Amino acid sequence: MDFQLSSEMLDLQATVRHLAQTKIKPRAREIDSTSAYPQDIFEEFQRADLLGLCIPEEYGGSGAGIMGLTLAIEEVTKYSNVLGLMLLLTRLPTGPIMIAGNEEQKQRYLPGIAKGTQRSAFCLSEPGAGSDVAGMSTRASEDPDCEGGFILNGTKCWISGGMQADWFVVFAKIGDPSIRNHTNVWGFIVEADSPGLTRPRVDKKMGVKGIDTAEIVLENVRVGPRQVIGGGFALAMESLNAMRPIVAARGIGLAEGALMYATEYVKERQAFGKTIAEFQGIQWEIAKCATEIEAARLLTYRSAWLADQGKYTKEFVPYLSMAKYYATEVAVKASGLAVQLLGAAGYMEDHPVEQFYRDAKQLTIVEGTTQIQLGLIGRGVLGHDLWWD
């Protein structure tokens, strides 16, 4: 057993850490306050060759895998959760294509993401089907004018990067959408400029501002046979399973950033004749939070290692879900502690901890809520996928 990162991963970590400190840290508050898409940081990621970390080399990526992307996102999210999301969006929509797409689809859609010439988004959630994926009502009907083609109708909501995307992976039901049959949920690739596809609304969010979350409406949108991924309900689930360590990385990065900022503050803040860092009660809270961050890191790195081996099917779900559940809850806890350690100052926009606090909560909701993860872990134990005997 080796807990040491490879020299390549250490180099990647150092590169992204420097970029985060010099480019992202100075911009993070402005991005949050204006909600403007940070194109300049996207271009920094492009120049640093960070947009294709998880994409194989044969499709224009660097082949660093889930582990490489996890490390990069952890560093970036120490200062900006929204820029961690920007990197995450290089894997979430491309995942279904890498898992179940054919060679033509991989050659057509993956290189543009890796090079930064295209952006994409993942369309699964609906107004009446968030956690209940099988309850989706978006329908894919066979196109009578195109053999092997389909016509899509439905509405997808809470789509991260929806306004910036050049193409989408859309999940829809073949046939009657009221039937909860897992085999009739298919994946489709839909170009953003397809007739009938509109983006009528951008959501106003509590946090993670700078990358739009949008509603995507499909009205008689035609997709040809070359844009059909298929895959069934299992593809949607395996795509999300493989993302657990990446979302968890946003959690540990945010937790680290919040605790580091608060720690430096309490070392300078004078009260009762000494710095508040000298009080044992403060030290204990910092110690407990630091321990939880390190525990979350171990869960996250292990889950990334599993995902890179293709171990994101049912029997590995408890390990992947543990990372996502625990790391995102630690992010909420650490950001809350940071606000508390700064006191009234932490509640003000003069310090970034209030932004950490707002941004952290999103992580316990997206890509499977805390409660969904607990259910998956619980069923894993009951089914002996996770067992100790």
Image: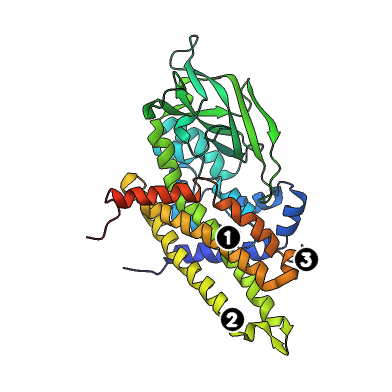
The reply to whether residue 311 is visible in this rendering is: no
Q: Are marks 3 and 2 in contact (CB under 8 Å)?
A: no
Specify the color scheme: rainbow
Residue placed at 64% from the left, 52% from the top? Answer: 82
Instruction: Give the Cα separation between the discs numbered 1 and 2.
Output: 20 Å
Q: What residue sits right under mark 2 in the picture?
A: 281
Instruction: Identify the amino acid type marked 2.
Output: Gly
Residue under the point 55% across and 79% down: 284
Report whether 265 appears left or right of 138: right
Which residue in the structure is indicated by mark 1?
332
| Quadrant into which the N terminus falls | bottom left
Res. 350 mark: 3
Q: Quadrant of the C terminus?
A: bottom left
Task: Check disc 2 and report its element: helix, strand or loop.
Answer: helix
Q: Earlier in the sequence, mark 3 or mark 1?
A: 1
Q: Position of residue 230 (x, y in %)?
A: 41, 28
Please tell me whether mark 3 or mark 1 is closer to you in this view.
1
Q: Which amino acid, by three-letter code, is at mark 1?
A: Val
* Of the image marks 3 and 2, the number of the one nearer the N terminus: 2
Give the label on residue 87, or none.
none
